[in-house]
Image: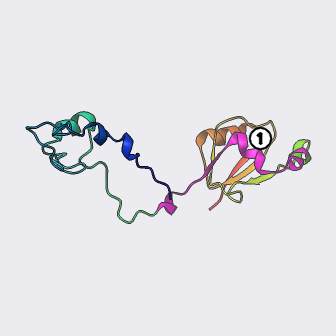
Amino acid sequence: MLCLSETARKKKTRKLRGHVSHGKGRIGKHRKHPGGRGNAGGQHHHRINFDKYHPGYFGKVGMRHFHLTRNKYWCPAINLDRLWSLVSPQTREFYKDKDQTAPVIDVVRAGYYKVLGKGNLPKQPVIVKAKFFSKNAETKIKSVGGACVLTA
């Protein structure tokens, strides 16, 4: 069993033997919880401390959302610079010299819903299927001769 308490000979009590009030003063007296336990009195007798060091602790912010289900907001995204990592290097080499056909990268099958426009694409046409495209991603895909296909 792990015991984290301090050994008796190192405690402050040992030093204070013989000193009547044990360092707590004669007049005020060392009582149990004179200011209340924990965060008690945050709006009353400890208001100055809460207002000064914890502004905005009390009150509400924003609108309530009854029965919040996160699945309707689920939208994993991938950037353009990682788009080609979804297909094998052999596929990319196979379509490199072909001018009539282009590889299809189905982003949804790889577990992503949205394509974002960070990074650059190699000058090779590609057909990208996704649920959502950012404006920037769409222009970059079309600038290399590719196409954006929206899927349900």
Q: Is residue 71 covered in magenta? A: yes
Q: Which residue is mark 1?
A: 145
Q: Is residue 70 above or below residue 12?
A: below
| Residue 135 placement, left or right of 92 | left
The amino acid marked with disc number 1 is Gly
Residue 94 horizontal/vertical position (percent)? 91, 48
* Residue positioned most to the left: 27
Q: Residue sitting at 21 percent across and 37 percent down?
A: 49
Residue 47 horizontal/vertical position (percent)? 17, 40
Is residue 56 visible to us here? yes
Residue 83 horizontal/vertical position (percent)? 73, 45
Q: Is residue 112 covered in magenta? A: no
Residue 124 horizontal/vertical position (percent)? 81, 40
Rendering quarter of residue 28: top left
Q: How is the image coloured?
A: rainbow
> Which stretch did the figure color magenta?
70-93
Viewer-closest of 144 and 82? 82
Give the dominant element type of the magenta stretch: helix, strand or loop.
helix
SS for tag 1? loop
